[in-house]
Image (cartoon, rainbow, N blue to C red):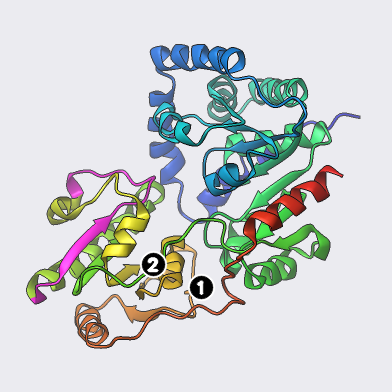
Amino acid sequence: MKKIITYEELFENEIIFNNLGREYYYKKTYVEFCKKNNNCVIQLLKTILNSIENVLFPLDKDAPNILMIDYIFKRIIKQQEKNYNFFIICNSIHQMKKEYRYRENFRNHFPHKWETLINKSFFSKNMYCAHKAIELIKQYITKNNIRIVIIGNDKLFLEKAVIFAARECKVPVVIMQHGVYNKDSFEKLHSAYTCDYFWAWSDYTKDIYLDVYNKENNSVKVIGYPFEIVRGRPQKKRTVLFLGNYYANVNKIEGERYLNIAKMVYDICIKKEYIFTYRPHPSEIIDDSYGILLKSIRKGVPLAEDLKYNEIVIGDISSVMLEAGLIGRKVIQIIWSDRSKIGFTDPIYSFTLKCSDNYQDIEQLLDNVFNKDDEAFIDDYYLKVNDNFETTIFNLINELLN
């Protein structure tokens, strides 16, 4: 008998966010995103582009077809295009244009019709349209003979629908770690819970995943860090890169708190004549509330360039901090005094210099760090750098295909 997907299953993330006091996201930010995405001209353009992709970009008939959501793992796409055809689910025309320079054996698909149906169910609390969307995704998977689905997040509505569709088509789903996972991620956010296979950055993530979820050991593989890194000493001294976050998108109070910490660090840097740069999170919405930070914001600059330039990287929880540590930057993690009030308590990084959100403590730590020539050290257990990454992924994909 065919399983009927319930509202609670598909839209689990909303329930999790509400339980964590982050209902602001689905009451405001997500609503604004849907309005923007429902623009008739943009939807028409995406429909036309979908047709063009199918006609103008024939793929290798003998290569297995893999479905991936977004260009998060473009390192894999670039390395494996010679072996597989990639179908990329991408809702951003700008992102699609930016990544075209890598293209060989891949095809884009804009999921706007699926998302429109899914969101109708989300706002109406009626699952009729969502089930229709899942049927369309199943048709897409079957029509294109998709053999494997690789996803970076199994909690977002579209990704969840793709997982349910793939499962009904008996196509294996891999959740590949794309950000920082800790115990809170698994216990409170239920990250990577719905996948058939989980590819982790390290044994650290694998161990806590197995411990919390009690899954089969052979369903989890350690692949190492899946993004390209460029090592080297910083080009400038006395420079601070502050990592933004999308906290304001999910909880206004949380966002304001983090912004105040950034302004505090900015003020210290101005006083001490350190160079301060604010790098926004890709999902972060910049507005007038950023005040004095606005002139220090860098957008559209490759991450590798920012990390190459700066001596110190400051943040809360971000995969960029791991990358900064991998290339030898000094990394400071600000520990909030009211962190537990927003549902997350685990200051996970073993390699960071930790500091309270007190002005004097931050100022003193910055002075101390700038006067030392130490580099960050990340234990291989916590974050693995895989020198045979391309071969590892090739073997794992073939294992699933066979």
State whether residue 216 appears in this view: no
Nearer to me, 264 or 294: 294
Mark 1–mark 2 CB contact (< 8 Å): no
At x 38%, y 37%, the residue is 28
Residue type at mark 2 is: Asp
Residue positioned 60% across, 56% down in the render: 177
Callout 1 amino acid: Asp
- Tell me the SS state at disc 2: loop
Badge 1 element: loop
- Dot 1 or dot 2: first in sequence order is 2
Is 204 in front, or is 86? 86
Vertical order, 299 against 220 (above or below) = above
> For residue 364, which quarter of the picture?
bottom left
Q: Which residues are magenta?
A: 272-289
Q: Relative to the observer, which residue lies in front, 125 or 262?
A: 262
Q: Which mark is residue 316?
A: 2
* Residue 310 against residue 41 in the figure, above or below: below
Tell me where residue 176 appears, x and y as whole percent.
64, 52
Q: Is residue 138 magenta?
A: no
Query: Would you call the spot at circle 1 few (<14 residues within 10 Å), some (14-19), or many (20 or more)?
Result: some
Which residue does the image show at 21% across and 60% down from the upper left? Answer: 277
- On the picture, is 203 further left or further right than 281? right
Asked if the stretch drawn in magenta spans residue 288, the answer is: yes
Screen quadrant of the N terminus: top right
